[in-house]
Amino acid sequence: MKNGTIEMQPFEVSVPEVSGEGIERLITIQIPMEWDAEIGEWLMTEEGSRLVEETKCRAMGLLTPGEMKTLRERLGFSQKQMGELFQVGAKSWTRWETGRYRPMRVIGLLIRALHDGAVSLDYLLERAGMKEALSPWMKAIPASTPVVGYFNFSSPPARSVQPQSESRSPIRWSKMRPSRPAMRSFPRRSLLPQTKEATEA
Amino acid sequence: MPLQVIPVRWLEQVCRIIATGDLRLIQRTKDFSKEFQKGFPNDSEGEVEDAFLDFLESENPVGCPVTMDYPTGDTWEFFFLFKGRKTYGKIMLREGGRKVLLFSAHPPEKKRLRCEL
């Protein structure tokens, strides 16, 4: 087969048990894969990985990364604000939207609850201490108004606050791991070439 | 042959690529994803890439060089920790150091690496 050929191939998606330890069931789906003639193996494609993640999220009762992004855009929040709303790290929501990371199941269920209107946006804003900081229109939302009830999901939100520019830009993977270098200060000092000054110092 | 310290140049190039998170540069085999999911069904591949980085950036990480039938890259295997569990990893640096290919990240099938005595 020619190198780089893309074909639909079967792939078994492992759905975890609620405990997270074992496998509850396997779901076989067809995903596009790329043939690597050099090593004689199929490689995962971005589209294939996305389909695997979506299948797993749906089977776990969680929103898919795409649905999380849609929810955020319809609320008119930035990724940072969504992180604050769910009281997680500033970059967590960003990572979840990429599909390369998945929220803990309990957080995922809370996100789903907001999406489904089982928990109100007003409640979450208040718990996160964000209500006062937001624009007046947000304060005007009646308490316990579910997201799906308040916003028309079939059309863009008619509000003064527009989604921030980051939501319109294509996702750049290189920016998805921004917190890592800061945490580990890569490249490690010991990996850097030793200059004469540094050696003498 | 004992475990070997993984060469700094290889570490440097692999870490730099993985840190980008760019899937055009970080390739994964079908078996990588399949076995990772089997071993860690509740976890995501982004997390294991972070764990790779944590291990590869530690002081003098050790592993075994892997000679394959398709020697167009440098491949190393090693044990590392993922979510507190000992995990087998295998990574190839290919295309002149421009891409990495993730072969494995799953619970060990053998107690020792191939170069361990």
Image: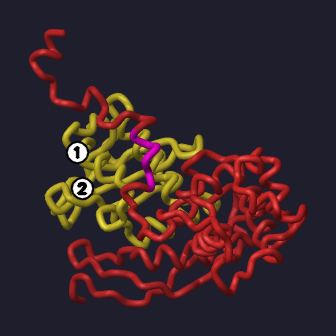
Chain colours: A red, B yellow
- From the viewer's side, name the closer residue of A109 and B96: A109
Q: Which residue is mark 2?
A: B93
In whole angstroms, how far apart are the C-alphas of marks 2 and 1?
7 Å
Q: Nearer the viewer, residue B21 or B108?
A: B21
**Does the magenta run of residues contain A179?**
yes
Q: Measured from the top left, where is residue A73 in percent x and y? A: 61, 70
Residue pictured at 71% horizontal, 47% vertical: A133
Residue A56 shows in the view: no
Q: Residue furthest left?
A: A196
Q: Which residues are magenta?
A: A176-181
Q: What residue is drawn where x is 35% and y is 28%?
A: B59
The location of residue A174, given as percent across then percent down, is: 36, 57
Out of A65 and A199, give the one closest to the viewer.
Answer: A65
Total tally of numbered discs in the picture: 2
Give the camera-side residue of A130 and B53.
A130
Crowding at mark 2 (Cα within 10 Å: few <14, some 14-19, many 20+): many
The reply to whether the C-beta atoms of the residues labelled 2 and 1 are less than 8 Å apart is: yes
Mark 2 vs 1, N-terminal side: 1
Left or right placement of residue A2 versus residue B82 in this view: left
Please, is residue A99 above or below residue A200 in the view?
below
- Quadrant placement of the N terminus of chain A: bottom left
Residue flagged by tag 2: what amino acid is it?
Leu
The residue singled out by tag 1 in the image is B10
Residue visible at 32% across and 76% down?
A: A41
